[in-house]
């Protein structure tokens, strides 16, 4: 008896395939999709997901091959911020049980950066809570930048200190900082819903100040705040318009004690579509998978690495990431090349810690309950 014919492959829908072919062509040329095409990426079905990831992966590999840049966060000052960003555990009135401390010493900041660099990071992000730095704060951070650069001249240093005033970006650049991060976070239309103490335009101005001073602009977004597809597309195009070299995509970590506590609107599939859309809109940017990847992408994290070209190693500002060893194993299993390490030259990066085999001692044939 001959077997029944297999059903047609549901993911091979011609409309989506045509869309993705166009997006890959534009991405390889460094061009953006139309807004409608970007929206369409966010509205593809789960059946189309692997095709979407594969298409975004082609754009990623055209610029970045299989290399991944590891970034490392150093929280210079934690908590006690006077601003009221709804998503933030460090905000005014936050009851989140996060670490609160004032400025790290220069020595402690340099030591923290050293740990990240030893772990494989090629960018160190010096971050401080607050509306923006005083001139004294800029002096303090400049000393940290100089200290890190002295030890690790090839490592990029990015500062993230809030809204900048006249001359501050220039001083950071003179100290050796390579980049400045200030995220737009969401669309201009909904910015007032996530913050009342400063405005979207303030954020845009700071990114422009940084770029004007010769710092590489790093600016990204947070998904999962309750935004619409249109908001996500708007912010992605705004980041492209600002010429962001580096685009971190965060997924909301809804801390208890903040207004967005309990907001778990994202699925792993949605996260992948968002990353793919940003990859198509910003095809030449360093796309960085940032906070929330572990809790929102979960077991689909390896697929995200086909789209992004950078991740944070280790912990975030106020939440813990997965173990740095687990990150390195994830990259090794996917045969990604960690920038700036010896693995750059290796055809097959070795897993750092083979998983080993555990002999079964439970279930049938034993008095112990089965693993079910
Ligand atoms: S300005 Fe920065 S640290 Fe302060 S609440 Fe907003 S996101 Fe958090």
Image: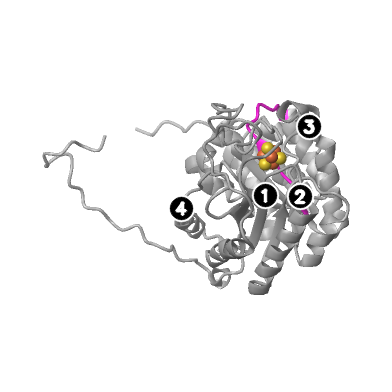
Q: Image check: 312 left or right of 175?
A: left
Which residue is drawn at the image coordinates 54% and 67% (left, top)? 118
Question: Which segment did they paint magenta?
Answer: 217-229
> Circle 4 sits in a helix, a strand or a loop, which is it?
loop
Q: Please tell me which of labels 4 and 1 falls first in the chain.
A: 1
CA–CA distance in space, label 4 to label 1: 23 Å
Residue under the image location 52 percent in, 48 percent down: 302
Q: Alpha-carbon distance for marks 2 and 3?
A: 39 Å
Q: Give x and y (percent) for residue 141.
A: 71, 59
Q: Residues within 10 Å of mark 2 (few under 14, many from 20)?
A: many
Q: Name the residue under label 1.
A: 128
Mark pair 3, 4: CA separation: 39 Å
Q: Quadrant of ligand 1?
A: top right
Tag 2, which secondary structure? loop
- Residue 175: quarter of image: bottom right
The image quadrant that residue 107 belongs to is bottom right
Foreground tag (4 vs 2) = 2
| Disc 3 to disc 1, C-alpha distance | 37 Å
Disc 4 under 8 Å from ligand 1? The reply is: no
Task: Give the SS element for disc 3.
Answer: helix
Asked whether 220 or 109 is in front, the reply is 109
Q: How far apart are marks 1 and 2 (CA)?
A: 8 Å
Q: Mark 4 points at which residue?
A: 323
Q: Look at the numbered disc 1 and give the secondary structure of its residue.
A: strand
Query: Which residue has dot 2 on it?
Result: 133
Precedes in sequence: disc 3 or disc 1: 3
**Is 83 drawn above or below residue 301 in the view shown?**
above
Image quadrant containing the N terminus? top left
Q: Is residue 181 above or below residue 221?
A: below
């Amino acid at each position: 008896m001959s077997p029944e014919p297999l059903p047609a492959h549901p993911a091979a829908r011609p409309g989506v395939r045509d869309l993705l072919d166009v997006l890959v062509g534009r991405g390889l040329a460094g061009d953006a999709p139309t807004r409608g095409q970007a929206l369409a990426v966010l509205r593809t079905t789960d059946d189309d997901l692997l095709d979407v990831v594969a298409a975004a992966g082609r754009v990623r590999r055209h610029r970045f091959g299989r290399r991944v840049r590891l970034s490392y966060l150093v929280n210079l000052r934690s908590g006690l911020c006077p601003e009221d960003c709804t998503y933030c555990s460090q905000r005014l009135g936050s009851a989140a049980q996060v670490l609160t401390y004032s400025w790290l010493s220069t020595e402690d900041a340099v030591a923290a950066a050293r740990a990240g660099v030893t772990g494989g990071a090629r960018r160190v992000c010096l971050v401080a809570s607050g509306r923006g730095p005083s001139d004294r704060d800029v002096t303090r951070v400049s000393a940290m930048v100089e200290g890190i650069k002295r030890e690790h001249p090839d490592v990029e240093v990015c500062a993230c200190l809030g809204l900048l005033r006249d001359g501050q970006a220039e001083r950071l650049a003179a100290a050796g900082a390579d980049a400045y991060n200030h995220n737009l976070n969401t669309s201009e239309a909904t910015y007032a819903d996530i913050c009342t103490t400063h405005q979207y335009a303030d954020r845009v101005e700071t990114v422009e100040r940084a770029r004007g001073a010769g710092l590489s602009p790093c600016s990204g977004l947070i998904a999962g705040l309750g935004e619409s597809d249109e908001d996500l597309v708007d912010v992605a195009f705004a980041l492209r318009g600002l010429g962001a070299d580096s685009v971190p995509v965060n997924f909301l970590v809804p801390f208890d004690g903040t207004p967005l506590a309990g907001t778990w609107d994202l699925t792993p599939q949605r996260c992948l579509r968002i990353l793919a859309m940003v990859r198509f809109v910003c095809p030449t940017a360093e796309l960085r998978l940032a906070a929330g990847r572990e809790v929102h992408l979960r077991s689909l994290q390896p697929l995200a690495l086909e789209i992004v070209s950078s991740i944070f190693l280790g912990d975030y500002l106020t939440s813990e990431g997965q173990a740095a060893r687990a990150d390195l194993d994830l990259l090794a299993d996917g045969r990604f090349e960690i920038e700036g390490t010896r693995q750059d030259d290796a055809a097959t990066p070795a897993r750092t810690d083979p998983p080993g085999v555990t002999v079964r001692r439970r279930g049938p044939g034993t008095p112990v309950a089965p693993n079910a």
